[in-house]
Amino acid sequence: MKSLIGTLICCLFFINSALAQAVGMADVMRSNGKIYVVVAVIAIIFIGLAIYLFRIDQRVKKLEE
Amino acid sequence: MQSKWWKILGILLILYSIIGGLLFPVPHLNILNETIRNLYFHVTMWFSMIFLMLFSMIQSIRFLNGFDKTKDLKAEAFASTGMFMGLLGLLTGMIWAQFTWGTFWVNDPKLNGTAVTMLIYLAYFILRNSIENDDSRARVSAIYNILAFVMMIVFIGVLPRMTDSLHPGNGGNPAFGNYDLNSGMRMVFYPAVIGWILLGVWVAQLRYRIKTLEINKENI
Protein backbone atom coordinates (compact mmCIF):
# COMPACT_ATOMS: atom_id res chain seq x y z
CA MET A 1 0.00 0.00 0.00
CA LYS A 2 2.81 2.39 0.87
CA SER A 3 4.44 1.93 -2.52
CA LEU A 4 1.08 2.48 -4.18
CA ILE A 5 0.72 5.83 -2.46
CA GLY A 6 4.29 6.60 -3.50
CA THR A 7 3.40 5.96 -7.13
CA LEU A 8 0.35 8.20 -6.84
CA ILE A 9 2.36 11.00 -5.27
CA CYS A 10 4.95 10.73 -8.02
CA CYS A 11 2.17 11.00 -10.60
CA LEU A 12 0.54 13.99 -8.89
CA PHE A 13 3.91 15.65 -8.64
CA PHE A 14 4.43 15.17 -12.35
CA ILE A 15 1.05 16.73 -13.20
CA ASN A 16 1.53 19.47 -10.62
CA SER A 17 4.90 20.49 -11.96
CA ALA A 18 3.38 20.65 -15.43
CA LEU A 19 0.47 22.81 -14.23
CA ALA A 20 2.66 25.04 -12.11
CA GLN A 21 4.13 26.58 -15.22
CA ALA A 22 0.70 27.41 -16.63
CA VAL A 23 1.29 31.17 -16.33
CA GLY A 24 3.05 31.81 -19.61
CA MET A 25 2.37 30.45 -23.09
CA ALA A 26 5.53 28.41 -23.30
CA ASP A 27 4.66 25.80 -20.68
CA VAL A 28 4.86 22.10 -21.33
CA MET A 29 1.16 21.22 -21.39
CA ARG A 30 0.36 23.90 -23.99
CA SER A 31 3.30 23.46 -26.36
CA ASN A 32 4.07 21.14 -29.25
CA GLY A 33 0.55 20.60 -30.50
CA LYS A 34 -0.54 19.78 -26.94
CA ILE A 35 0.65 16.19 -27.21
CA TYR A 36 1.52 16.28 -23.50
CA VAL A 37 -2.18 16.58 -22.71
CA VAL A 38 -2.80 13.30 -24.53
CA VAL A 39 0.12 11.68 -22.72
CA ALA A 40 -1.28 12.84 -19.39
CA VAL A 41 -4.74 11.48 -20.22
CA ILE A 42 -3.41 8.07 -21.25
CA ALA A 43 -1.08 7.97 -18.25
CA ILE A 44 -3.95 8.75 -15.85
CA ILE A 45 -6.14 6.06 -17.43
CA PHE A 46 -3.34 3.53 -17.14
CA ILE A 47 -2.52 4.49 -13.54
CA GLY A 48 -6.22 4.20 -12.71
CA LEU A 49 -6.35 0.71 -14.20
CA ALA A 50 -3.21 -0.24 -12.30
CA ILE A 51 -4.67 0.95 -8.99
CA TYR A 52 -7.87 -0.96 -9.75
CA LEU A 53 -5.81 -4.08 -10.40
CA PHE A 54 -3.99 -3.59 -7.09
CA ARG A 55 -7.31 -3.33 -5.26
CA ILE A 56 -8.56 -6.55 -6.85
CA ASP A 57 -5.28 -8.12 -5.77
CA GLN A 58 -5.85 -6.99 -2.19
CA ARG A 59 -9.42 -8.26 -2.21
CA VAL A 60 -8.29 -11.68 -3.40
CA LYS A 61 -5.60 -11.66 -0.71
CA LYS A 62 -8.23 -10.95 1.94
CA LEU A 63 -10.36 -13.85 0.69
CA GLU A 64 -7.33 -16.13 0.73
CA GLU A 65 -6.78 -15.36 4.41
CA MET B 1 5.85 -14.47 -6.40
CA GLN B 2 3.73 -13.19 -3.53
CA SER B 3 5.78 -10.01 -3.21
CA LYS B 4 4.64 -6.78 -4.73
CA TRP B 5 7.77 -5.23 -6.21
CA TRP B 6 7.56 -6.92 -9.63
CA LYS B 7 3.96 -5.78 -10.08
CA ILE B 8 4.97 -2.18 -9.40
CA LEU B 9 7.98 -2.59 -11.67
CA GLY B 10 5.72 -3.79 -14.48
CA ILE B 11 3.35 -0.86 -14.06
CA LEU B 12 6.21 1.65 -13.97
CA LEU B 13 7.85 0.16 -17.07
CA ILE B 14 4.59 0.35 -19.03
CA LEU B 15 3.98 3.89 -17.79
CA TYR B 16 7.48 4.83 -18.95
CA SER B 17 6.81 3.23 -22.33
CA ILE B 18 3.54 5.18 -22.71
CA ILE B 19 5.18 8.50 -21.94
CA GLY B 20 8.43 7.76 -23.77
CA GLY B 21 6.66 6.01 -26.61
CA LEU B 22 4.54 9.04 -27.39
CA LEU B 23 7.14 11.72 -26.82
CA PHE B 24 10.62 10.42 -27.66
CA PRO B 25 11.96 11.00 -31.17
CA VAL B 26 11.45 8.19 -33.71
CA PRO B 27 12.87 7.58 -37.20
CA HIS B 28 11.00 9.35 -39.99
CA LEU B 29 9.88 6.64 -42.42
CA ASN B 30 7.52 6.77 -45.38
CA ILE B 31 4.03 5.26 -45.03
CA LEU B 32 4.70 4.44 -41.37
CA ASN B 33 5.05 8.08 -40.27
CA GLU B 34 4.15 8.43 -36.61
CA THR B 35 2.52 4.99 -36.54
CA ILE B 36 5.99 3.54 -35.96
CA ARG B 37 5.20 4.30 -32.31
CA ASN B 38 2.70 1.42 -32.46
CA LEU B 39 5.76 -0.79 -32.11
CA TYR B 40 5.77 0.02 -28.40
CA PHE B 41 2.17 -1.04 -27.95
CA HIS B 42 1.17 -3.52 -30.67
CA VAL B 43 4.32 -5.64 -30.86
CA THR B 44 4.63 -5.81 -27.07
CA MET B 45 1.23 -7.54 -26.95
CA TRP B 46 2.67 -10.39 -29.02
CA PHE B 47 5.82 -10.63 -26.92
CA SER B 48 3.66 -10.78 -23.83
CA MET B 49 1.44 -13.46 -25.37
CA ILE B 50 4.36 -15.64 -26.47
CA PHE B 51 5.93 -15.49 -23.01
CA LEU B 52 2.62 -16.22 -21.28
CA MET B 53 2.08 -19.23 -23.55
CA LEU B 54 5.63 -20.36 -22.76
CA PHE B 55 4.92 -20.12 -19.01
CA SER B 56 1.65 -21.98 -19.61
CA MET B 57 3.50 -24.79 -21.38
CA ILE B 58 6.08 -24.97 -18.59
CA GLN B 59 3.26 -25.34 -16.05
CA SER B 60 1.74 -28.11 -18.18
CA ILE B 61 5.05 -29.97 -18.24
CA ARG B 62 5.37 -29.52 -14.48
CA PHE B 63 1.84 -30.88 -14.10
CA LEU B 64 2.65 -33.99 -16.12
CA ASN B 65 5.69 -34.42 -13.90
CA GLY B 66 3.85 -35.36 -10.71
CA PHE B 67 0.19 -34.55 -11.48
CA ASP B 68 -0.09 -31.59 -9.15
CA LYS B 69 -3.52 -30.04 -9.88
CA THR B 70 -2.41 -26.50 -9.05
CA LYS B 71 0.02 -26.61 -11.97
CA ASP B 72 -2.86 -27.36 -14.31
CA LEU B 73 -4.78 -24.36 -12.99
CA LYS B 74 -1.71 -22.18 -13.47
CA ALA B 75 -1.34 -23.40 -17.05
CA GLU B 76 -4.96 -22.48 -17.73
CA ALA B 77 -4.58 -19.03 -16.20
CA PHE B 78 -1.44 -18.26 -18.24
CA ALA B 79 -3.02 -19.51 -21.46
CA SER B 80 -6.20 -17.49 -21.07
CA THR B 81 -4.29 -14.32 -20.24
CA GLY B 82 -2.01 -14.96 -23.20
CA MET B 83 -5.03 -15.45 -25.42
CA PHE B 84 -6.38 -12.10 -24.26
CA MET B 85 -3.07 -10.39 -25.06
CA GLY B 86 -3.13 -12.05 -28.48
CA LEU B 87 -6.64 -10.76 -29.11
CA LEU B 88 -5.51 -7.23 -28.27
CA GLY B 89 -2.50 -7.70 -30.55
CA LEU B 90 -4.76 -8.83 -33.38
CA LEU B 91 -7.16 -5.90 -33.01
CA THR B 92 -4.42 -3.28 -32.74
CA GLY B 93 -2.62 -4.88 -35.67
CA MET B 94 -5.77 -4.64 -37.79
CA ILE B 95 -6.05 -0.91 -37.12
CA TRP B 96 -2.37 -0.41 -37.89
CA ALA B 97 -2.72 -2.45 -41.12
CA GLN B 98 -5.71 -0.40 -42.28
CA PHE B 99 -3.68 2.81 -42.23
CA THR B 100 -0.36 1.51 -43.54
CA TRP B 101 -1.13 -1.50 -45.75
CA GLY B 102 -4.60 -0.31 -46.78
CA THR B 103 -6.87 -3.03 -45.44
CA PHE B 104 -7.75 -4.50 -42.07
CA TRP B 105 -6.70 -7.97 -43.14
CA VAL B 106 -4.13 -8.89 -45.77
CA ASN B 107 -3.25 -12.43 -46.77
CA ASP B 108 0.03 -12.16 -44.96
CA PRO B 109 1.48 -15.43 -43.63
CA LYS B 110 1.98 -13.86 -40.23
CA LEU B 111 -1.64 -12.75 -39.98
CA ASN B 112 -3.03 -16.07 -41.13
CA GLY B 113 -0.60 -17.91 -38.87
CA THR B 114 -1.80 -15.82 -35.96
CA ALA B 115 -5.42 -16.59 -36.79
CA VAL B 116 -4.60 -20.31 -36.83
CA THR B 117 -2.75 -19.94 -33.51
CA MET B 118 -5.76 -18.27 -31.92
CA LEU B 119 -7.97 -21.12 -33.14
CA ILE B 120 -5.51 -23.69 -31.74
CA TYR B 121 -5.68 -22.07 -28.32
CA LEU B 122 -9.45 -21.68 -28.61
CA ALA B 123 -9.55 -25.44 -29.07
CA TYR B 124 -7.53 -25.77 -25.85
CA PHE B 125 -10.27 -24.04 -23.87
CA ILE B 126 -13.04 -25.97 -25.62
CA LEU B 127 -11.16 -29.19 -24.86
CA ARG B 128 -10.91 -28.22 -21.19
CA ASN B 129 -14.60 -27.51 -20.94
CA SER B 130 -15.64 -30.66 -22.74
CA ILE B 131 -14.09 -33.16 -20.31
CA GLU B 132 -16.10 -33.72 -17.15
CA ASN B 133 -13.58 -35.72 -15.15
CA ASP B 134 -11.07 -33.47 -13.38
CA ASP B 135 -8.09 -35.80 -13.67
CA SER B 136 -8.43 -36.64 -17.34
CA ARG B 137 -9.20 -33.01 -18.17
CA ALA B 138 -5.96 -31.91 -16.57
CA ARG B 139 -3.92 -34.62 -18.29
CA VAL B 140 -5.40 -34.27 -21.78
CA SER B 141 -5.26 -30.48 -21.75
CA ALA B 142 -1.68 -30.47 -20.47
CA ILE B 143 -0.57 -32.63 -23.38
CA TYR B 144 -2.57 -30.55 -25.86
CA ASN B 145 -1.09 -27.37 -24.41
CA ILE B 146 2.44 -28.53 -25.19
CA LEU B 147 1.38 -29.28 -28.76
CA ALA B 148 -0.36 -25.90 -29.01
CA PHE B 149 2.79 -24.05 -27.99
CA VAL B 150 4.89 -25.87 -30.58
CA MET B 151 2.27 -25.10 -33.24
CA MET B 152 2.28 -21.44 -32.23
CA ILE B 153 6.04 -21.22 -32.68
CA VAL B 154 5.74 -22.87 -36.08
CA PHE B 155 2.88 -20.67 -37.26
CA ILE B 156 4.07 -17.28 -36.07
CA GLY B 157 7.79 -17.84 -35.66
CA VAL B 158 8.90 -20.17 -38.44
CA LEU B 159 6.48 -20.26 -41.40
CA PRO B 160 6.22 -16.45 -41.91
CA ARG B 161 10.01 -16.33 -42.19
CA MET B 162 10.02 -18.86 -45.03
CA THR B 163 7.70 -16.96 -47.38
CA ASP B 164 7.11 -13.33 -48.29
CA SER B 165 5.56 -11.31 -45.56
CA LEU B 166 4.77 -7.67 -45.02
CA HIS B 167 6.00 -7.91 -41.46
CA PRO B 168 9.53 -6.75 -40.75
CA GLY B 169 12.04 -9.52 -40.23
CA ASN B 170 10.16 -11.98 -42.44
CA GLY B 171 10.69 -13.17 -45.99
CA GLY B 172 13.52 -10.84 -46.88
CA ASN B 173 12.00 -7.80 -45.20
CA PRO B 174 14.47 -6.16 -42.88
CA ALA B 175 13.86 -6.72 -39.20
CA PHE B 176 13.63 -3.82 -36.84
CA GLY B 177 16.96 -5.03 -35.58
CA ASN B 178 18.74 -4.07 -38.78
CA TYR B 179 18.31 -0.34 -39.01
CA ASP B 180 14.69 0.63 -38.39
CA LEU B 181 14.83 0.05 -34.68
CA ASN B 182 17.47 2.54 -33.65
CA SER B 183 18.93 2.59 -30.18
CA GLY B 184 16.50 5.29 -29.07
CA MET B 185 13.56 3.04 -29.86
CA ARG B 186 15.17 0.11 -28.14
CA MET B 187 15.32 2.14 -24.93
CA VAL B 188 11.52 2.24 -24.92
CA PHE B 189 10.71 -1.04 -26.66
CA TYR B 190 12.53 -3.50 -24.40
CA PRO B 191 11.29 -1.99 -21.11
CA ALA B 192 7.78 -2.03 -22.62
CA VAL B 193 8.12 -5.74 -23.45
CA ILE B 194 9.25 -6.55 -19.91
CA GLY B 195 6.49 -4.40 -18.44
CA TRP B 196 3.74 -6.08 -20.43
CA ILE B 197 5.07 -9.55 -19.62
CA LEU B 198 5.03 -8.69 -15.90
CA LEU B 199 1.50 -7.28 -16.18
CA GLY B 200 0.37 -10.42 -18.00
CA VAL B 201 1.87 -12.65 -15.32
CA TRP B 202 0.14 -10.56 -12.67
CA VAL B 203 -3.28 -10.86 -14.30
CA ALA B 204 -2.72 -14.60 -14.79
CA GLN B 205 -1.75 -14.93 -11.13
CA LEU B 206 -4.96 -13.14 -10.09
CA ARG B 207 -6.99 -15.45 -12.30
CA TYR B 208 -5.30 -18.50 -10.81
CA ARG B 209 -5.87 -17.28 -7.24
CA ILE B 210 -9.56 -16.56 -7.83
CA LYS B 211 -9.99 -19.95 -9.49
CA THR B 212 -8.32 -21.62 -6.49
CA LEU B 213 -10.69 -19.79 -4.14
CA GLU B 214 -13.66 -20.99 -6.20
CA ILE B 215 -12.48 -24.59 -6.09
CA ASN B 216 -11.84 -24.41 -2.33
CA LYS B 217 -15.33 -23.02 -1.84
CA GLU B 218 -16.84 -25.91 -3.81
CA ASN B 219 -14.96 -28.46 -1.74
CA ILE B 220 -16.16 -27.11 1.59
Image (cartoon, coloured by chain):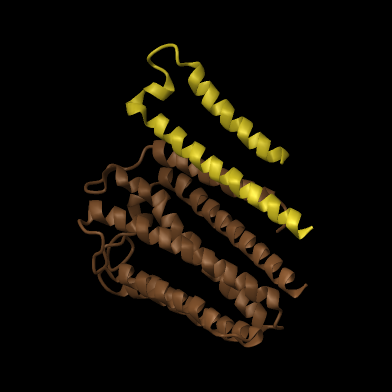
Chain colours: A yellow, B brown
Q: Is residue B64 left or right of residue B144?
A: right
Residue B96 % position (x, y): 30, 53
Q: Residue at x 61, y 85 (%)?
A: B139
Q: Residue drawn 28% across and 42% down?
A: B28
Farthest left residue? B102
In this rendering, position of residue A11 left or right of residue B18: right
Quadrant including the N terminus of chain A: top right
Quadrant for residue B60, please give it: bottom right
Total labels: the figure holds: 0
Question: Picture coordinates of residue A29 (x, y %)?
Answer: 42, 24
| Quadrant occupied by the C terminus of chain A | bottom right
Q: Quadrant of residue A34?
A: top left
| Residue A22 or residue B29, whichever sits in front | A22
On screen, B211 above or below B128? above
The answer to whether B184 appears left or right of B28 in the picture is right
Whole-percent x, y for residue B61 in the image: 62, 79
User: Does residue B55 appear anywhere in the picture?
Assistant: no
Residue positioned 43% across, 23% down in the render: A28
| Residue at x 61% of width, y 34% of height | A8
On the question of residue B183 being in view, the answer is yes
Residue that sits furthest to the top in the current view = A23
Front position in the image: B58 or B79? B79
Where residue B68 appears, as percent x and y from the top left, is 71, 79
Along the line of sight, which residue is nearer the eye, B179 or A12? A12
